[in-house]
Amino acid sequence: MDERESGRLLGLHGVAPSYWTGGGGVGALAVHLTYEAGTDLRVRHFISATTSRDDAIDTKWNEVLADMHAEASKFHATTGWGDFDHQRTSGAHTSLAGSKKQQAMHHIETIAAILGI
């Protein structure tokens, strides 16, 4: 068994003896954004067309952000949305963790706007 395989085994207390906090290159890049559709609340999944782990993440970001921009009218203007739009215009893309934060911000602000708070 190699080191990666042994890292998947649980130790005495249920914690892996070793683990990796990162992985390989990104396959498909995905962003999930909440929007209002009549009386329904929906989530739109934006997924990059480029899916090879060998392709540059900036290419994937550009694809997703362009698709998001094309559907901008669906979404409430939130801080999270604004951050994504700034990335589209500036070309300075966030990390995957930063993206998740922006998605959560957008969701919370969207719900708050719908509830009027």
Image (tube, grey):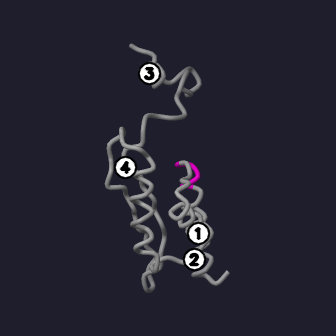
- Per the image, label 1 sits on a secondary structure element best described as helix
First to last magenta residue range: 96-100
Q: Which mark is residue 77?
A: 2
Quadrant of image for the C terminus: bottom right
Task: Give the residue drawn at x 59%, y 25%.
Answer: 13
According to the image, label 1 marks what residue?
A: 82
Q: Kindly give the residue lying farthest to the front in the view shown.
A: 90
- Per the image, label 2 sits on a secondary structure element best described as loop
According to the image, label 3 marks what residue?
A: 4
What secondary structure do most residues of the magenta stretch adopt? helix
Q: CA distance from mark 3 to mark 1?
A: 40 Å
Asked whether 26 or 88 is in front, the reply is: 88
Quadrant of image for the N terminus: top left
**Left or right of 41 on screen, residue 48:** left
Q: CA distance from mark 2 to mark 4?
A: 26 Å
Q: CA distance from mark 1 to mark 4?
A: 22 Å
